[in-house]
Amino acid sequence: GKYMMKTVTHKEQILLKKMLKKYHDHIVSNPGTLLVRFLGLHCLSVRKDRKAGKGSAVQKVYFVVMNNMFNTPFEIHRRYDLKGSWVGRVTTGEFDPSVALKDLDFTKANEKIRVGEERKAKLVAQIERDSSFLKENNVIDYSLLLGIYQLGSSGEDCVEAKEIALEKVKADARGDPRENFQRDSSLGLKGASTATTGEITVRLSPTEEFNHHEVPVHQAQMGGMLSSDQKALYFLGIIDILTPYDGRKHLEHWFKALRYDSKGVSCCPPAMYAERFNQFMKDAIA
């Protein structure tokens, strides 16, 4: 679907309201931001009866509505949740495409986000601006959510991709506002790219510009980024941006640093977290 809902803690909703003005300003001044787009913060009051007939208590449940970064008709073959840390950042069990792999899985598989030097420079610059914003707002524990659609992984995939692409081109030509293929904050269409596998040619986006707005580099081809070798389509964004580095997190970092490499634990001060995150992304993007 186009939207997602997620419950948040009382502490997280306080942080969101506190940084809302700065968050809005950052989104406006950085149209290519990778930060998750929050569309609403809501609260439900749930009344629970107490035991032994002692009246009732009201519990508040907070949740946010946000854009779905994987709002695409293409199947996500692999997904990663990347923080830049390495202590405990590995998944166990059999591979499941619906479960996000982690940093050590990404490194062990020799994965790279292959987009070429020009797009890498733009992407890294935007990630640095986004992480700087989060650092200034005392936020940690965020991650880059990466989804990979592998073009030509089978003949059926190629045919499916071609059919989807053709339907999108037709919808754009009709200008049908009811279609989910129009350019918006979650699906950007700009430029034209093709991927050829065997005798199948897949057109990934039309050349038409919409509304005279620049589409973010990470959403420029069918809502994602076509790899430089034209074998993969990447969908990515920065999520989980509501964890403050408070006293409890400070103690967590101190305790874990006694047992593990302090540079490798996920919980660390905002400046250290942002620097490590940025370095990991520079190495991951090629």
Image (tube, rainbow, N blue to C red):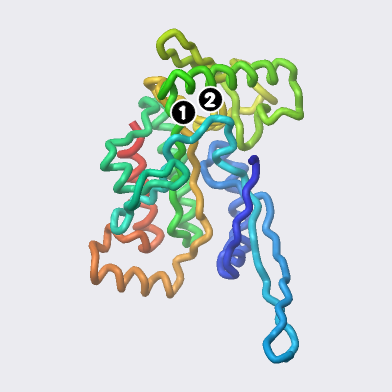
The number of discs equals 2
Q: Residue at x 37, y 25 (%)?
A: 116
Dots 1, 2 in contact, CB < 8 A: yes
Task: Look at the picture and state if 281 lies above or below 256.
Answer: above
Residue at the top extreme, as displayed: 199
**Quarter occupied by residue 160:** top right
Q: Which of the pair 40/165 is nearer the observer?
A: 165
Of circles 1 and 2, which is in front? 1
Task: Look at the picture and state if 255 lies above or below 118.
Answer: below
Position in image of residue 99 (x %, y %): 44, 47
Q: In the figure, is residue 50 to the left or right of 112?
A: right
The amino acid type of the residue labelled 2 equals: Gln
Q: Which of the pair 240/2 is nearer the observer?
A: 2
Residue 10 in sight from this viewpoint: yes
Check residue 233 in the rendering and tell me which mark sits there, or answer none. 1
Residue 24 in sight from this viewpoint: no
Position in image of residue 217 (x %, y %): 51, 30
Check residue 221 in the rendering and tell me which mark sits there, or answer none. 2
Q: Which of the pair 274/155 is nearer the observer?
A: 155
Check disc 2 and report its element: helix, strand or loop. Answer: loop
The C terminus, quarter of image:
top left
**Quarter occupied by residue 112:** top left
The amino acid type of the residue labelled 1 equals: Leu
Q: 10 Å neighbourhood of mark 2: few (<14), some, or many (≥20)?
A: many
